[in-house]
């Protein structure tokens, strides 16, 4: 028996599991006529998600941060993927992207909030907010809440959270230290931002304009993408030597967000957290709806300043 067989993960109730790919979880689906917005499509999971959903017939609007990346997306992913400039850490850039999407006057079937930064080695700040929290949570909060009226009546919002949401600061969201100056840990700050993604999805699920709309959070798995550039060198070495056993491929990592965004099997699971293409129990903090409401209020107060 090979090591790969020993470590192979079983499928879950959905019929998919750890090793399922984005192509497999969307097999047989016809997305012709659907429009999907994906953040961060120039690399990694976002690129694979855009490629697979476009292959199934969807029109993709994909955010990128620079003109150079936009040209690369157009060249590599083809005419079904339309790049949109959007720097999630800059509210004015998010607002410009929202205005452009409004000009297109195209109803949106799903928004996949995929882009993010991970484990920044020092505390970078912008607009008085620690950069991981600003980019991963507030940028997406700004984008999604301003596009809800373009979401179709059966539309879905997918927040790419992480198992790292189980390792935030002790109090969860540090509402009194969102700038990160009182205490900073690269991994706890990342965990805080991923907890925020999950809580945003939970709260959004209760606030959707239509009862048939839904919001979800997903853990894509541990994937060897360019985000690991900030990992400890020993972890990066492990990713190279043991990746086949412990890390998902990009094709596997993109599966859960594709599954949750378009598969009919999740239509009655509004507000749930998914991992390996199946519903997964989150941490207690990930179910703290009082924290979720407070986060919503603080996030709304932030974006209303711009």
Image (spheres, grey):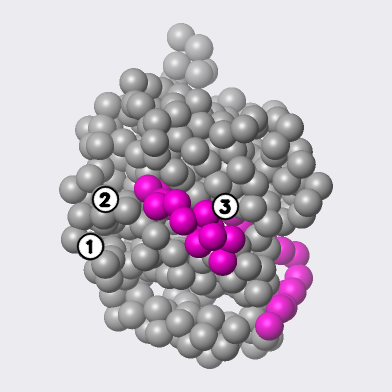
CB under 8 Å between discs 2 and 1: yes
Q: Residues within 10 Å of mark 3 (few under 14, many from 20)?
A: many
Q: Looking at the image, can residue 269 be seen?
A: yes
CB under 8 Å between discs 2 and 3: no
In x, y percent, where is residue 159? Answer: 44, 56
Q: Residues within 10 Å of mark 2 (few under 14, many from 20)?
A: some
Mark sitting on residue 210: 1
Q: The residue tagged with tag 2: helix, strand or loop?
A: strand
Alpha carbon separation for disc pair 3 and 1: 23 Å
Vertical order, 22 against 218 (above or below): above
User: Residue at 44% of width from left, 43% of height from top?
Assistant: 35
In x, y percent, where is residue 290? Answer: 30, 80
In this view, the residue farthest toward the top is 1
User: Is 105 displayed left or right of 152 in the figure?
Assistant: right
In this view, the residue farthest toward the right is 68
Q: What segment carries the magenta color?
A: 99-127
């Amino acid at each position: 028996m090979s090591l790969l067989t020993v470590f192979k993960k079983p499928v879950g109730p959905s019929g998919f599991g750890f090793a399922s790919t984005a192509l497999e979880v969307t097999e047989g689906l016809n997305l012709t006529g659907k429009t999907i917005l994906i953040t961060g499509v120039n690399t990694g999971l976002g690129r694979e998600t855009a490629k697979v959903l476009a292959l199934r017939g969807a029109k993709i609007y994909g955010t990128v941060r620079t003109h150079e990346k936009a040209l690369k997306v157009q060249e590599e992913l083809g005419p079904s993927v339309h790049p949109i400039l959007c720097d999630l850490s800059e509210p004015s850039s998010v607002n410009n992207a929202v205005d452009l999407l409004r000009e297109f006057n195209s109803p949106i079937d799903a928004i996949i909030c995929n882009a993010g930064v991970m484990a920044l080695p020092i505390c970078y700040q912008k607009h008085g907010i620690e950069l991981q929290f600003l980019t991963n949570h507030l940028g997406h909060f700004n984008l999604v809440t301003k596009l809800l009226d373009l979401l179709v009546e059966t539309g879905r919002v997918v927040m790419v959270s992480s198992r790292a949401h189980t390792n935030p600061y002790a109090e969860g969201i540090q509402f009194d230290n969102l700038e990160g100056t009182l205490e900073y840990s690269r991994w706890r700050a990342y965990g805080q931002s991923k907890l925020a993604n999950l809580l945003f999805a939970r709260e959004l699920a209760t606030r959707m304009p239509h009862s048939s709309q839904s919001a979800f959070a997903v853990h894509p798995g541990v994937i060897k993408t360019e985000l690991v550039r900030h990992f400890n060198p020993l972890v990066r070495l492990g990713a190279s030597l043991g990746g086949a056993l412990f890390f998902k491929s990009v094709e596997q990592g993109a599966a859960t967000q594709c599954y949750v965004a378009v598969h009919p099997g999740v239509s009655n699971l509004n507000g749930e957290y998914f991992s390996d293409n199946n519903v997964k129990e989150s941490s207690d903090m990930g179910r703290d709806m009082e924290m979720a409401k407070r986060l919503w209020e603080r996030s709304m107060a932030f974006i209303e300043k711009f």
